[in-house]
Every structure is written in structure tokens, then in C-alpha cells.
Amino acid sequence: MLKFIYVIIMNLFRAPYMIPKMRREAEHPEKYSEEERYELARHVIRLMKLTGGIHTKAYGTENLPEEGGYMMYPNHQGKYDALGIIHTHKKTCSLVMDKAKSKTILVREFVDLLGGKRLDKKDVRQALTVINEVAQEVKEGKRYILFPEGGYDFNNRNNVCNFKAGSFKIALKTKAPIVPVALIDSYKVFNSFWLGPVTTQVHYLKPIYAEEYGNLKTPEIAELVRNRIQEKIDEELGTLS
């Protein structure tokens, strides 16, 4: 949390220029392509990484499907999670986010810039609309990040909680590839007492295709994806120790 405040303070001098620029590009998609808006988001992330002493290593990028849309389901550790993925994911992607957490400054700009979806957990009808919208866009070739844990604990320490089955309704609707994403030490960036330089890891695991999950129910898919992420984290932490 202290590092988050530090990064914000260190970039305050950029705010009068960067935030209006992010808003302008988000509000005028007819002038700025999806690729241009995505690159602006990545540029802002690079600035935050530079001032915060944050390094992120990506593994398994060769596993990402080359064509078509897909759903990325990562474990959730903190505020940096989506930023770490976007930084290492060269092709444009977007995200589904809790509406209540998407209204703070800079978070709001990121969500709008990426054309993200705000999901209201308290409104079943609205949530269903968002699920259908994301499913349609994935069918059309878009790539999305969705955190199936739904939240995270402070100072997570690489723990993986249960995945919510409803998160995988989009995959069943689209039959698109599911890409499990294992995040390691992402919590140290903005959601711990860690103050020094930090290196996080983003592991893109092998996609799970509809041939494998198509006949499963959502709780079974949730367990399948969670187990693969947990296995990868255990493998990496065991190697490091």
C-alpha cells in the first residue's frame, strides 16, 4: 500500500497531462484505434513500473492463441495484477472488473481506455448483461481478463482462494480457449508492506480448449483452472526455495 502511494506521488507531475489524455482517447474511439489506446495504457504502466522499482517477468507467452478471442483467468493478489498482465500481453486485451472498485481515479481511466466492463455483483440482471456482452465480443475475437476469485486479501503471499463458478459462464457461452494465468509475488507491488524493488511473475499456461471443458459444469471448470494455476505456483515456489 505504501508503494502504491509512493508511485502515485512520484507521478503526480504527469497527472495533468496523462489523465486528460487517457480520458480523451477513451471518449473518442472513433479517433483512436484499440491498438493506440492499449499502447497508451501500457505506456502508463511502464511509467509506474519505472518509478516504483517494479519488474515483471513473463513466461509461456508462446501458449497464447495466435488467432481469435480467448478468456484469461488469473489468480488475484492485488491492484497490480491486471497491470502486470497487460504489460506482458502484447496483443490488445480488456478486463471485467467489479463496478464498485472501478470508480477511483486512474482505475476509472484504465477501464475506460481498455473498453473494460464493469460488473455489478449486487445486480443479477446487469451482471448477466455484462456476461452476454463479453461473450459476444470474445466470439468476435476480443481477449479478456477476468479474476474468478472475485477479490483478494491484503498481503496475499501467493495464496489461491476458491474460484467462483459463475466466472466461467462466458467460456461456456463462447467455447473460446481458456488461458489460466498464474501470478506470483504480484501482491508485493501495491498490496503488502514491501517497499523495496520487486519482481513479479506472469505465467501464461497452456490453453484449455472447448474439447476439454465443453462437457463440464462451471464448478468443474473452476476447479480445473484453479488446480492448474495452483500447481504452477507450487512448482515455481518450490523451485525458488
Image (cartoon, rainbow, N blue to C red):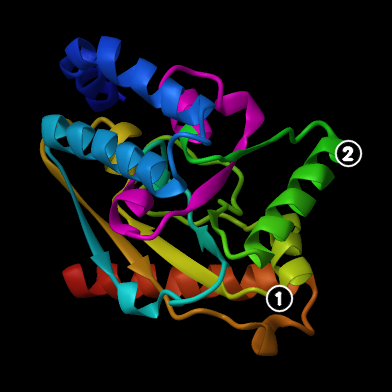
- Could you tell which of marks 2 and 1 lies nearer the N-terminus? 2
* Callout 1 crowding tier (Cα within 10 Å): few <14, some 14–19, many ≥20: some
Residue 200 lies left or right of residue 22; in this view the side is left
Which quadrant is the C terminus positioned in? Answer: bottom left
**Closer to the camera in the image, 33 or 238:** 33
| Amino acid under disc 1 | Lys
For disc 2, the marked residue is: 125
Q: What secondary structure is found at the residue carrying circle 1?
A: loop
Quadrant of the rendered image containing residue 2: top left
Task: Quarter of the image for the N terminus: give it.
Answer: top left
Return the residue at label 1. Answer: 175
**Is 96 part of what is drawn in magenta?**
yes
Read off the magenta span. 83-112
Q: Nearer the viewer, residue 142 or 204?
A: 142
Q: Residue at x 42, y 46 (%)?
A: 82
Quarter of image, res 48: top left
Distance from Cα at disc 2 to Cα at disc 1 = 22 Å
Indicate whether 123 appears above or below 224: above
Secondary structure beneath dot 2 equals helix
- Give the residue furthest to the bottom: 211
Q: Residue 186 magenta-drawn?
A: no
